Image (spheres, grey):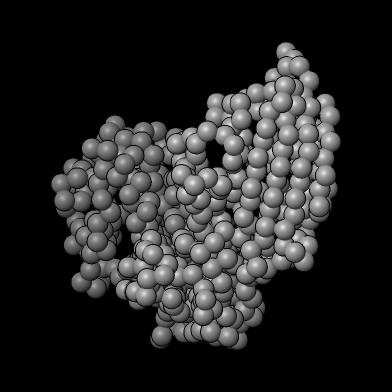
Amino acid sequence: MAQRAVWLISHEPGTPQCGTIKFSRRYPTVENRARVFNEASYVPVPEDGPFLKALLFELRLLDDDKDFAESRDSCSHIQKTSIYGLPIGGEELWPVVAFLKNGMIYACVPLVEQTLSPHPPLISISGISQGFELLFGLQDFLYSGQKNDTELNTKVSQLPDLLLQSCPFGTLLDANLQNLSDGINFTSVTHPQKQPAWKAGMYKGKPQVSISITEKVKSMQYDKQDIADTWQVVGAVTCKCDLEGSMPNVTISLNLPTNGSPLQDILVHPCVTSLDSAILTSSSIDPMDDSAFSGPYKFPLTPPLESFNLCYYTSQVPVPPILGFYQVKEEGVQLKITVNLKLHESVKNSFEFCEAHIPFYNRGPITHVEYKVSFGQLEVFRDKSLLVWIIGQKFPKSMEIRLSGTVTFGAKSHEKQPFDHICIGGTAYLKLHFRILDYTLTGCYADQHSVQVFASGKPKISTHRKLISSDYYIWNSKAPAPITYGSLLL
């Protein structure tokens, strides 16, 4: 249910055109849908001039319209509804909902979600009833309490803002325009603000800007001379700008410390209005290369109402945050495991959580575990196929921790045990799960004092950042070197 276009026309007998379009609104997104639904029977909505002439002719409101017109006046075209077909350039624009009341013509073109040849039954077109509801809502708004032409013109000037709220993108949400008008602070009639088509409304309330930087670090570590360890950081900057006005302008700057890792492969949201070419050309290069752009990364933008991802980026940091060693030796129904983890000295030693998950595939259930841990605690997961090393919120002062032990397995039962095509025999891995708040591995941050807002009121600006592990694997160093491991980093 949607409308392709809406018109408000003043009927003015005795004037050259017999009428003036007071207001019109078209919905290009709905028009595109009509083109798809109507297929070969699609007729585009004409410009205001041809539409006005065709509508006045069909309603018999032209001053010189005294001749018989077969297409309009024959007995086969007796009009019992307010739904018309307008001749436009040799084609027929149908259906058009229109009626005259108090010298004002209210008209709209509903979307028909099927072909128009032959005309489908009116009762099957839900957009028609919605069109009537919208037009009656316009009529009630314009003439409730209206006493003179000045008040009428004032209300007509408020329609662009009201329809943004009541009928965004052509879909009617609320036909009670009077209630909506009570909660909108209308802009000046003589200096109206241009509302972009992609912005369905305007924010009213306390101005505030929220910026959140989330970095995910991926790593594959093998502890082998013939296979290089790999790691990468992928970042996303999420923003929410609650600012009054139809087109507020904001500039957000991302900064790096002196030893920060340059941001690469930057993709930005379409609301960003301009960008330094150095930001766009910084892509997957050697982080030690002097040509890498180290910021500040400035993003001037016109924000949408909803939360949005300002940009995505990657970065090659010098070292992974946690270096690991994992070794598994098989002895009958037992496995001897050794795990060493070391937190890099440059990383913030304050975790929201930190755990190492050690899965065992293609085996029976874990029946017994003998172990020693230098830090944290070890638990057997309820499915008896996973060890969880709960490290906690901090590494010890040495920044190193160790786990060693022997895991005993029972016989494989008919019950479904975890299976993996890669982790066969000694091929096994450990996966780290951690999150660090108020920290990014690249050092990237948004300084709230550098955020520029060009809108009414002084906004409250809040910034957040966090580092999260994602696909952070440490493989058994005693296992054969599989070529498929690297693909897990993608």
Residue visible at 25% across and 72% down?
A: 14
Residue visible at 64% across and 48% down?
A: 325
Horizontal side, residue 290 vs residue 387: left or right:
left
Residue visible at 30% across and 70% down?
A: 20
Give the residue furthest to the top. 414
Q: Is residue 325 above or below residue 292?
A: above
Residues 17 and 285: in front is 285
Return the x and y of residue 103 as percentages of the image width and height.
39, 67
Return the x and y of residue 18 as percentages of the image width and height.
26, 68
Residues 39 and 468: in front is 468
Return the x and y of residue 488 as percentages of the image width and height.
50, 41
Residues 317 and 399: in front is 399
Residues 357 and 238: in front is 357
Based on the displayed image, in which of its 4 quarters is residue 409 positioned?
top right
Q: Is residue 7 above or below residue 328?
A: below
Q: How many labels were placed on the picture? A: 0
Q: Is residue 200 visible?
A: no
Based on the displayed image, in which of its 4 quarters is residue 38 positioned?
top left
Residue visible at 32% across and 73% down?
A: 277
Q: Is residue 313 visible?
A: yes
Q: Is residue 163 above or below residue 416?
A: below
Return the x and y of residue 124 as percentages of the image width and height.
44, 35
